[in-house]
């Protein structure tokens, strides 16, 4: 078990200190860089929270798409296979498979944006 | 740029003497005194330096505000070199496009360490987030969009063959099919699979438009790449990606969501609706815009911007350019992927 507070909690606190305590003390020309640092910390914090969920969810959906043929494949290999199949239009001759593939693309993209840029997601009408 | 080395007090000190000599020789001045030589912020791919100089005699006699443009330590493969970009800028200037006047060019590394060109410095701001957010600019934005539509039509009056631009690859080499092949070649070597980009590239491949009469395309014509002084357009910048192309390519790029910044609802560059921009373009060009072609190029724009964003991250990941800004840019590829899904599968959105 890691010591408390967890790395994630420390990251959140460090970001808060950066934005609320240090930012007002910085000269104007350094503030853009400080905002980029705070943004990076926020991404790292959200990724630590959700990386496992994303990998498992996408892997499960891809295993279902490929039925039993994909059992035991590593998640990254499975994703690579999915990408390759999309390139050559493997699913386009079967409407249900095509629809399922598109559902996975939506799932993957929205899950990634929840970590990388939830504000952009919201601005596009996704909760 | 975040993470770059702290600025020295006078980063261009050692370069002043050879540069002053070059400027004097190029302009016919008896002497040039460089009062200021400082790097400018912005320009993710190229490096720009502000020069304030006094010319004694010659074609630029008096005080001048100039920009020196040269390559950043690392770049992206598709960009022109500075000598080529200078020629494109000259062609645009001659065609009456509002650009900073190109003045001199040099490939001699003894002067500034790498090839560069000199142009006049235009006033104003290019910062896209400010332009799309500034309430004071709001009333002027439709007119600015119209002006940009006319400027773009003027760029598109330049067409092949053009002996000054003979270095530009033929349209057949840079049209949509070769671009899609380029995206795939990049994705083949990318460590992380990108299923949405593969899916969208497949759509592009199966919906290729008929061949177009090629014109000079800016290929990065967007908010953030033009300067506004108050409400006046003072210059269209950053010509490093220019080449022959379908005119709808620039229109799709300008309107694509990646370049609307703070105002996703304003579909023409984050500054106005499409109608003002389209109407001005059509009036100046004397030909209608084909909306289906714009849609194709808008889809391609999102794939292309996603690939460029990943390449920008590569400059940190692979080439070691220490920049947080570049490192973070790769994350924007997923924003393009969302846009691709919204364009190509609007009814499939989970909460649509």
Image: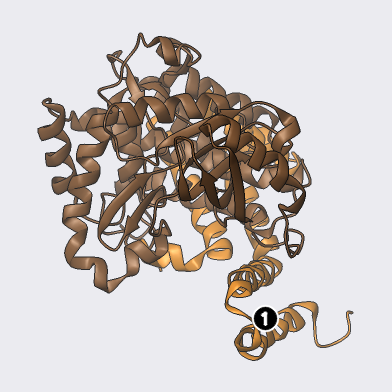
Chain colours: A orange, B brown
Residue appearing at x 70%, y 61% in the figure: A52
Q: Quadrant of the C terminus of chain B?
A: bottom left
Residue B77: percent from the left, percent from the top?
Answer: 62, 29
Above or below, B45 against B41 in this view is above
Residue B191 in view of the camera:
no
| Total numbered badges shown on the rendered structure | 1
Work out whether residue B107 or residue B244 is closer to the camera in this orientation and state it. Answer: B107
Above or below, B210 against B87 in this view is above
Work out whether residue B193 or residue B178 is closer to the camera in this orientation and state it. Answer: B178
Residue B85 in view of the camera:
yes
Residue appearing at x 38%, y 59% in the figure: B124
Examine the image and state in which quarter residue A125 appears: bottom left
Residue appearing at x 62%, y 80% in the figure: A27
Mark 1 neighbour class, 10 Å CA radius: few under 14, some 14 to 19, many 20 or more? many
Please state if B230 lies on the left or on the right of B114 as rendered.
left
Above or below, B101 against A126 in this view is above
Please state if A127 lies on the left or on the right of B328 as rendered.
left
Q: Which residue is mark 1?
A: A15
Residue A109: percent from the left, percent from the top?
Answer: 51, 52
Q: Quadrant of the N terminus of chain B?
A: bottom right
Q: Chain of mark 1?
A: A
Residue B58: percent from the left, percent from the top?
Answer: 48, 36
Above or below, B196 against B178 in this view is below
Please state if A16 lies on the left or on the right of B126 as rendered.
right
Work out whether residue A64 or residue B152 is closer to the camera in this orientation and state it. Answer: B152
Residue B297: percent from the left, percent from the top?
Answer: 34, 32
Residue appearing at x 46%, y 18% in the figure: B174
Examine the image and state in which quarter residue B127 appears: bottom left
SS at badge 1: helix
Q: Residue furthest bottom?
A: A21
């Amino acid at each position: 078990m890691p010591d408390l507070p967890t790395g994630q909690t420390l990251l959140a606190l460090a970001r808060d200190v950066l934005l609320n305590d240090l930012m007002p003390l910085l000269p104007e020309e350094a503030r853009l860089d400080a905002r980029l640092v705070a943004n990076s910390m926020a991404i790292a914090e959200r990724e630590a929270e959700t990386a496992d969920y994303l990998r498992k969810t996408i892997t499960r959906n891809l295993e279902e798409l490929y039925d039993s043929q994909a059992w035991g494949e590593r998640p990254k290999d499975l994703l690579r296979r999915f990408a390759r199949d999309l390139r050559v239009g493997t699913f386009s001759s079967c409407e249900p498979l095509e629809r399922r593939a598109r559902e996975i693309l939506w799932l993957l993209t929205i899950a990634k944006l929840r970590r990388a840029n939830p504000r952009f997601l919201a601005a596009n009408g996704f909760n | 740029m975040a993470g770059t080395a702290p600025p020295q007090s006078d980063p261009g000190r050692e370069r002043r003497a050879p540069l002053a000599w070059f400027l004097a020789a190029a302009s016919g001045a008896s002497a040039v005194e460089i009062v200021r030589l400082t790097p400018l912020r912005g320009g993710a791919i190229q490096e720009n330096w502000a020069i304030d100089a006094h010319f004694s005699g010659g074609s630029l006699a008096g005080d001048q505000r100039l920009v020196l443009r040269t390559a950043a330590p690392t770049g992206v493969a598709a960009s022109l070199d500075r000598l080529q970009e200078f020629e494109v800028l000259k062609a645009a200037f001659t065609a009456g496009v509002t650009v900073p006047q190109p003045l001199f060019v040099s490939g001699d590394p003894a002067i500034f360490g790498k090839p560069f060109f000199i142009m006049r410095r235009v006033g104003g701001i290019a910062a896209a987030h400010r332009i799309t957010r500034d309430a004071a600019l709001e009333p002027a934005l439709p007119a600015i969009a119209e002006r940009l539509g006319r400027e773009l039509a003027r760029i598109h009056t330049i067409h092949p063959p053009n002996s000054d631009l003979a270095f530009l690859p033929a349209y057949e080499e840079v049209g949509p099919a070769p671009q899609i092949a380029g995206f795939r070649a990049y994705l083949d070597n990318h460590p992380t699979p990108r299923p949405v980009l593969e899916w969208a590239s497949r759509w592009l491949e199966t919906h290729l438009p008929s061949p177009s009469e090629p014109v000079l395309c800016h290929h990065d014509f967007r908010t953030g790449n033009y300067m506004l002084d108050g409400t006046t357009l003072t210059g269209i910048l950053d010509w490093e990606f220019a080449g022959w192309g379908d005119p709808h390519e620039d229109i799709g790029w300008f309107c694509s969501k990646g370049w609307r910044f703070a105002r996703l609802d304003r579909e023409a560059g984050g500054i106005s609706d499409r109608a003002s921009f389209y109407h001005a373009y059509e009036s100046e060009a004397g030909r209608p815009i084909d909306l289906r072609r714009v849609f194709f190029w808008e889809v391609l724009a999102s794939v292309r911007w996603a690939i460029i964003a990943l390449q920008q991250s590569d400059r940190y990941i692979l080439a070691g350019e220490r920049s947080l800004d570049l490192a973070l840019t790769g994350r924007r590829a997923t924003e393009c992927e969302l846009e691709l899904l919204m364009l190509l599968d609007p009814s499939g959105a989970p909460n649509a």
